[in-house]
């Protein structure tokens, strides 16, 4: 039986009301969404769940292992790194730095200090789950794991060990989902799909309690929130105690849910089987208002998982398409956007007192007023783009590529303008001139169009892109490569700035202008010269600037294909703020902007962006994160645990693997660093690897800052100390040892050289000494016969006189003298005391021979030690000369000979003085004939000098010239040590 007509109508109305009030708001594609896939290094087919560790790294489970993402690079952990099963569903990062990895089957593993630990290395990790991915509950460094379906045990992972506790529940033939474990109370919560109650099971006491009144199956729990779904509606509950829960929200919903999460802000995300994700933009903890309809995102994508990171950026795990990312600013801008269905490609933008008008890349545009965007269709059959837009009260003039169209906002009607027929084509630009005229720039030149007379006048006949009146009758005119000054009256032009292709010209204040160029950034000039150039080197987003929009006399906005820049000329230092998609712009391709009060309206290739200037400028000056050093490789040793000593040996290369987790920069990050101890110069690198080649031994500290896409710096540096130790041959002690060794070798060589030279000299000396000794012996051999000859002459003389008694006495003394002479002639040295005894014996013998013709005296100073030794038989020849040549010739006085031993100034002084006639009064023949003994003594002195390095100086003085008579002989003998006797002299 068919239902009545009224009932059918009622049902249709109910369905319509349901659709109107409860159907989600669809956004098929989100502008600003970034996708990462195989081409970016995410080499897999399926991506599963995502998580973020305590450092901020994103971890993605895939069918080709586990991937770590730092916003710039993906690092893969697969079979070769130690995974036994590369089908990784999820992972659980722990505060201690471990990453607990959950594969679909086989063994659990974990990542620690860059190394995968599997069940081969740790026997406690054998996977107890056969077919189900475990439910994981985390508390600090402890994980609680259990099977989703009919669990038999609770597993606890802690300190790299996995322990289990049995669960004693009789499941019978029913299917129970174990959806939550409360580690505070040791309570496991289970529910069957067809049952309307929850079982609360205490694993310690084994007590079971029933929580009634719950329908559907659990789809997610977080903290004290539970979400249940029965294919018709969602129910949200909050725990009020261990066994009491309260329903807080309910929302009608149909469809099959693949996955669901409650994010860090307690907002619910549902991934639908038919594609897309439903996002409830409302905290589930807020009970003050019912759940609003969800927003549907990415309807054309199958989403496996959604993750909201610490910075409120949103990540989507897509089936077969990698992962997608949207920054917090972009997502918030589009979720809260007052303008719906705003994604047209805007080519131009302008305003008057009441409206903001945009022109699209087709013969259409829109008017923004009172928070609404009203579409304008200029010509539905024309697809040409809007190149210029002029507003005069209610009249809008759209300059399309090939024609001009007028639009009247008072009656919402459009019509073709005759300007195109007058100037022969569409414009490059339209510039206000007077109240009733405009300047039109096109490929034919510059035209003044008068709106009252409907006439056009060419005043410049070169291809014109821009114009700007700077006086009533003078205009700046820009063509493809130059800027001219043009007189309106005479139509004469003068080249002003050469080599600049100006895309836009604006006046800042009297006699101060700003120009946007195609390749040279921004030019500030007056009517005489260029005052300032602003380019990428100053912080501008791009040197290719499309348009300038004035905020104040010192502030303007520059639109580019890479975003928009706000340039502040106030003060001595130029200040530039850059804004891109990362900051919420619908697109980086910006056609222009208009400023209205504190708001800026930015026309982009993906719609109109509306922003508070104050909020845009309220960006933090520094980024609240640090650079992370993932590992340090010194030589062949790579360090993942950076708490240990980082050291290597020169000339090892040092490589730092860095990450700066600013995901909003979408990989456009760089690093500013220096190495203290090596250089004080800061360097900037776009690479995440800092390589130091063959640095010398020493202790160093790497200081590194992260820079985002806009050059904004991390709030503090990351400092890492490391040391390059020298090889043993580079150490100071080895250098010192080497120096000593070289000095030793040098000393040995020098010593060898000098020893060889000394030995040679010694050999020469020995040879010379031998000769000298032979000479000395020869001299002694000469002295003895000479002395004996003299004595025999004396004996002969006594016998001749027949003085037999004297001859007998003389012979007796002579015999003693001969014995002593023979005795001392064998010795080189003799003590002074023996020398004096020998001299006394000799003088007594001569005195006897000469009948007391003289007296003698031998005395020693108190300074002289009688035991000192002197060369033997050295003095006797001089005494003999005194007796022989000085005494016998005296007639008026008795002769006297004095021998005196003294010591002064480290020298032994022996004086032999006589009162004879003096050496100077002797005949030359006598001197020559009778100085043989003296000559022998002098020869002995020279020989002693050679043999014993003894300095002996002979000094003979004739006393006749000193009011005295006689001769004084002095011998100066320097002291030496007799090593045999130890006596000094």
Image (cartoon, helix red, strand yellow):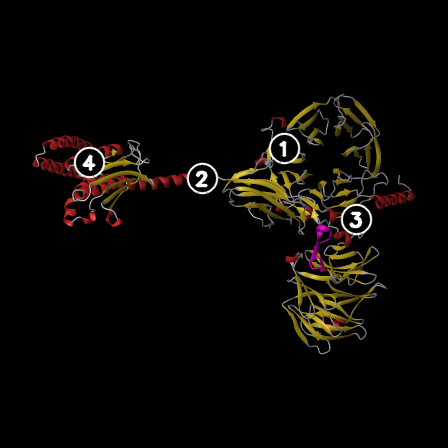
Q: Give the range drawn in magenta.
A: 566-589
Which residue was labeled with disc 1? 110
Q: Which is in the foreground here, disc 1 or disc 2?
A: 2
In the image, is residue 422 above or below residue 104?
Answer: below
Task: Check if mark 3's residue and mark 4's residue have beta carbons within 8 Å.
Answer: no
Task: Check if mark 2's residue and mark 4's residue have beta carbons within 8 Å.
Answer: no
Q: Which is in the foreground here, disc 4 or disc 1?
A: 4
* Label 4 vs 1, first from the N-terminus: 1
Of the pair 20 and 96, the residue shown nearer to us = 96
Q: How far apart are marks 3 and 2 (CA)?
A: 74 Å
Extreme-front residue of the structure: 892
Which residue was labeled with disc 4? 843
Q: How far apart are marks 1 and 3 (CA)?
A: 40 Å
The location of residue 765, given as percent across then percent down, is 25, 40
Look at the numbered disc 1 and give the secondary structure of its residue: strand
Residue at the image position 32 percent from the left and 35 percent from the top: 862
Q: How far apart are marks 4 and 1 (CA)?
A: 119 Å
Of the pair 304 and 315, the residue shown nearer to us = 315
Which residue was labeled with disc 2? 736
Which residue was labeled with disc 3? 336
As for residue 568 lying within the magenta part, the answer is yes
In the image, is residue 178 above or below residue 630?
Answer: above
* Label 1 vs 2, first from the N-terminus: 1
Task: Check if mark 3's residue and mark 2's residue have beta carbons within 8 Å.
Answer: no
Q: Which is in the foreground here, disc 3 or disc 4?
A: 4
Of the pair 154 and 6, the residue shown nearer to us = 154
Q: How far apart are marks 1 and 2 (CA)?
A: 50 Å
Look at the numbered disc 3 and give the secondary structure of its residue: loop
């Amino acid at each position: 039986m068919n239902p009545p007509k009224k009932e059918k109508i009622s049902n249709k109305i109910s369905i319509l009301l349901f659709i109107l009030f409860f159907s989600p708001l669809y956004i098929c594609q989100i502008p600003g969404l970034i996708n990462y896939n195989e081409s970016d290094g995410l080499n897999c087919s399926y991506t599963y769940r995502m998580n973020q560790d305590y450092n901020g790294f994103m971890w993605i489970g895939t069918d080709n292992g586990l991937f770590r993402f730092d916003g710039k690079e993906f690092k893969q952990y697969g079979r070769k790194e130690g995974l036994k099963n590369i089908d990784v569903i999820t992972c659980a990062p722990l505060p201690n730095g471990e990453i607990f990895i959950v594969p679909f089957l086989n063994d659990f593993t974990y990542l620690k200090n860059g190394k995968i630990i599997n069940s081969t290395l740790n026997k406690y990790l054998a996977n107890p789950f056969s077919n189900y991915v475990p439910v994981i509950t985390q508390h600090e460094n402890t994980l609680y794991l259990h099977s989703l379906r009919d669990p038999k045990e609770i597993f606890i992972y802690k300190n790299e060990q996995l322990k289990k506790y049995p669960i004693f529940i009789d499941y019978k033939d029913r299917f129970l989902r174990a959806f939550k474990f409360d580690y505070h109370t040791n309570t496991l919560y289970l529910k069957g799909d067809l049952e309307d109650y929850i079982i609360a099971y205490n694993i310690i006491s084994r007590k079971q309690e029933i929580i009634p009144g719950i329908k559907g199956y659990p789809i997610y729990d977080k903290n004290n929130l539970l979400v249940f779904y029965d294919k018709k509606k969602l129910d949200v509950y909050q725990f009020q105690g261990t066994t009491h829960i309260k329903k807080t929200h309910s929302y009608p919903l149909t469809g099959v849910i693949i996955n669901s999460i409650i994010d860090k802000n307690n907002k619910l995300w549902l991934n639908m089987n038919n594609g897309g994700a439903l996002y409830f933009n409302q905290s589930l903890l807020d009970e003050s208002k019912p759940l609003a309809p969800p927003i549907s995102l990415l309807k054309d994508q199958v989403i496996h998982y959604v993750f909201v990171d610490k910075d409120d950026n949103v990540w989507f795990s897509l089936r077969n398409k990698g992962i997608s990312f949207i920054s917090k600013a972009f997502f918030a801008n589009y979720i809260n956007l007052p303008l719906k269905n705003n994604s047209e490609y805007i080519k131009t933008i302008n305003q008057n007192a009441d409206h903001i008008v945009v022109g699209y890349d087709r013969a259409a545009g829109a008017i923004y007023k009172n928070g609404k965007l009203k579409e304008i269709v200029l010509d539905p059959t024309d697809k040409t783009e809007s190149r210029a837009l002029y507003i005069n009260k209610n009249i809008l003039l759209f300059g399309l590529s090939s024609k001009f169209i007028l639009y009247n906002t008072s009656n919402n009607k459009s019509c073709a303008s005759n300007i195109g027929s007058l100037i022969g084509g569409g414009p490059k630009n339209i510039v206000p001139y007077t109240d009733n005229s405009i300047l039109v720039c096109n490929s034919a030149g510059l035209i003044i169009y008068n709106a009252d007379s409907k006439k056009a006048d060419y005043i410049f006949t070169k291809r014109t892109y821009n114009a700007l009146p700077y006086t009533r009758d003078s205009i700046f005119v820009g063509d493809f490569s130059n800027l001219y000054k043009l007189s309106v009256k005479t139509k004469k032009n003068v080249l002003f700035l050469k080599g600049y292709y100006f895309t836009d010209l604006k006046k800042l204040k009297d006699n101060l202008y700003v120009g946007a160029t195609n390749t040279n950034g921004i030019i500030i000039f007056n009517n005489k010269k260029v005052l300032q150039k602003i380019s990428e080197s100053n912080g501008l987003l791009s040197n290719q600037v499309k348009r300038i929009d004035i905020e104040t006399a010192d502030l303007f906005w520059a639109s580019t294909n890479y975003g928009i820049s706000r340039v502040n000329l106030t003060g001595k230092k130029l200040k530039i703020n850059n804004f891109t998609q990362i900051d919420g712009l619908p697109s980086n391709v910006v056609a222009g902007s208009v400023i209205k009060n504190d708001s800026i309206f930015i026309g982009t290739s993906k719609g109109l962006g509306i922003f508070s200037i104050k909020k845009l400028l309220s960006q933090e000056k520094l980024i609240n994160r640090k650079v992370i050093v993932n590992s340090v490789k010194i030589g062949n040793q790579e360090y993942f645990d950076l708490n240990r000593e980082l050291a290597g040996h020169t000339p090892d290369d040092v490589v730092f693997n860095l990450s700066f987790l600013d995901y909003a920069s979408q990989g456009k990050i760089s690093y500013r660093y220096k190495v203290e101890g090596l250089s004080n110069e800061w360097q900037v690198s776009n690479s995440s690897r800092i390589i130091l080649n063959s640095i010398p031994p020493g202790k160093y500290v790497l200081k590194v800052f992260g820079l985002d896409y806009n050059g904004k710096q991390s709030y503090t540096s990351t400092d890492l100390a490391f040391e390059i130790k020298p090889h043993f041959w580079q150490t100071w002690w080895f250098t010192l040892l080497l120096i000593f060794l070289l000095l030793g070798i040098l000393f040995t060589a020098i010593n060898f050289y000098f020893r060889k030279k000394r030995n040679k000299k010694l050999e020469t000396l020995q040879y010379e000494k031998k000769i000298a000794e032979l000479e000395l012996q020869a001299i002694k051999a000469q002295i003895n016969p000479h002395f004996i000859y003299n004595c025999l002459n004396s004996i002969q003389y006594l016998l001749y006189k027949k003085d037999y008694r004297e001859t007998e006495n003389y012979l007796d003394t002579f015999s003693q003298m001969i014995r002593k002479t023979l005795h001392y002639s064998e010795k080189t040295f003799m003590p002074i005391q023996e020398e004096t005894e020998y001299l006394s014996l000799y003088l007594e013998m001569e005195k006897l021979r000469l009948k007391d013709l003289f007296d003698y005296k031998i005395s020693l100073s108190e300074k002289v030690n009688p035991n000192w030794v002197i060369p033997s038989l050295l003095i006797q020849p001089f005494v003999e000369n005194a007796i022989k040549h000085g005494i016998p010739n005296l007639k008026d006085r008795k002769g006297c000979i004095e021998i005196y031993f003294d010591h002064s100034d480290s020298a032994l002084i022996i004086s032999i003085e006589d009162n004879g006639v003096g050496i100077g009064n002797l005949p030359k023949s006598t001197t020559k004939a009778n100085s043989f003994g003296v000559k022998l003594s002098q020869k002995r002195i020279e020989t002693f000098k050679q043999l014993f390095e003894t300095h002996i100086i002979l000094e003979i003085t004739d006393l006749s010239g000193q009011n005295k008579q006689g001769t004084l002989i002095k011998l100066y003998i320097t002291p030496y040590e007799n090593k045999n006797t130890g006596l000094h002299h």
